[in-house]
Image (cartoon, rainbow, N blue to C red):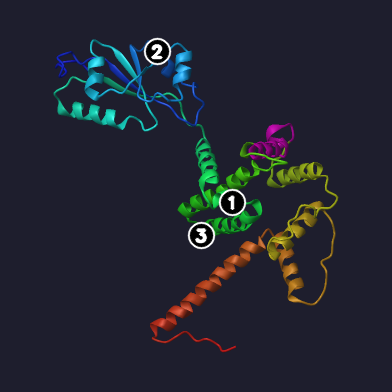
Amino acid sequence: MSATSETPEGTPGTGRVVLLTTSHRVAPGLLSWPAWQALRTADRVLCADGAHPQLPYLREAGIRVEETSVSAEDLITACAGGRTVVIVATGEGEPTLTDGLARLAGSGRVSMPELELLPASYDLPGARLLDLIQVMDRIRRECPWSSQQTHKGLAKYGIEESYELVEAIEDGDRDELREELGDVLLQVVFHARIAEEDPEAPFSIDDVAATIVTKLIHRHPHVFGDATATTPEEVKAHWLRTKAVEKRRESVTDGIPLHQPGLALAAKLGSRVRTAGLRVPLPTAEGIGYELLTLATRAEAEGVDPETSLRAAARAYRDAIRETESRGRSDGREPHREVP
């Protein structure tokens, strides 16, 4: 942008302003090459925050940083004569300064320097998880309720949030799905934060992540190793073989949680038996429970999740109930209820 007028101070308004932004989710000092070039070639480097995490690393690299806050007018003057000024932005992004620059540019009375926004570091995928960990840490320390919670006390919420996630999936509600995934994630982070305080066997969220990363790599030799798998069935076979070796299980039923819903439990047992190639006849006895067991194992063998199937049928039944109630209200009478 060429200088055709003068600044309020009477100095030609040429030069360049570089607003350098950084992410607090990336380790200080890990800046992009364009950022380092801008810093090293700048005539002045300014930062309004004396506690900015980047400052020690910039100074260690030989960058002279002035801890000062400037107005838009002063900044334009500082750029006069073709000088470059780099502003190391604070966490808020310098809204007062940028608003002032926009006001001057809009006035048409000031010859503006070249303005550049230069991201010096970028968030990697998953970076916002660091925010969640920091927020959870503070809540654990300062919230009267959260600070008293235990693994056992939170267990019921894990179950509730998991069911709400399933409901969001079945409803096909994308906004609800995103929210419920966050609620489930919170349970993981909350439990991991509590685990850090265990006096005998503490572990952190990093330990949790490292454990699942190791497990995933080991159980996917067709991705991270030399094994081959071209079908979902072969992948599942790899997974079960590796899992059996890891857990040193004596029975295909080992590791199946017995407290899960009955239909899911029956289907899981049937799946383990079928996958292992065992021939185990279903127990025969009178009663609805045994009939449900037969239906659940049959559904699993046919590729149908009995829990999901029953929930779908139950939801249809719920809709029918509401329709009957609605018809009764529209007729001006209460829906018929049988007296037990």
Secondary structure beneath dot 3 equals: helix
- The residue carrying mark 2 is 64
At a point 43% along the width and 16% down the height, the residue shown is 36
**Callout count:** 3
User: Is residue 218 highlighted in magenta?
Assistant: yes
The location of residue 120, given as percent across then percent down, is 43, 23
- Relative depth, front residue between 149 and 317: 149
- Relative depth, front residue between 117 and 285: 117
| Chain part drawn in magenta | 207-227
- Mark 1 is surrounded, within 10 Å at the Cα level, by few (under 14), some (14 to 19) or many (20 or more) other residues, namely few
Between tags 1 and 3, which lies in front? Answer: 1
Q: Amino acid at mark 1?
A: Gln
Q: Quadrant of residue 1?
A: top left
At a point 72% along the width and 41% down the height, the residue shown is 201
Q: CA distance from mark 1 to mark 3?
A: 35 Å
At a point 54% along the width and 41% down the height, the residue shown is 137
Q: Quadrant of residue 257?
A: bottom right
Between tags 2 and 3, which lies in front? Answer: 2
Q: Amino acid at mark 3?
A: Asp
Task: For the C terminus, give its image quadrant.
Answer: bottom right
The location of residue 283, given as percent across then percent down, is 83, 69
Compare marks 2 and 3 and give the one earlier in the sequence: 2
Q: Tell me if residue 236 can be seen.
A: yes
Q: Amino acid at mark 2?
A: Arg
- The residue carrying mark 1 is 148
- The residue carrying mark 3 is 171
Q: CA distance from mark 2 to mark 3?
A: 57 Å
Q: Are marks 1 and 2 in contact (CB under 8 Å)?
A: no
Between tags 1 and 2, which lies in front? Answer: 1
Vertical placement of residue 84 versus 258, above or below: above
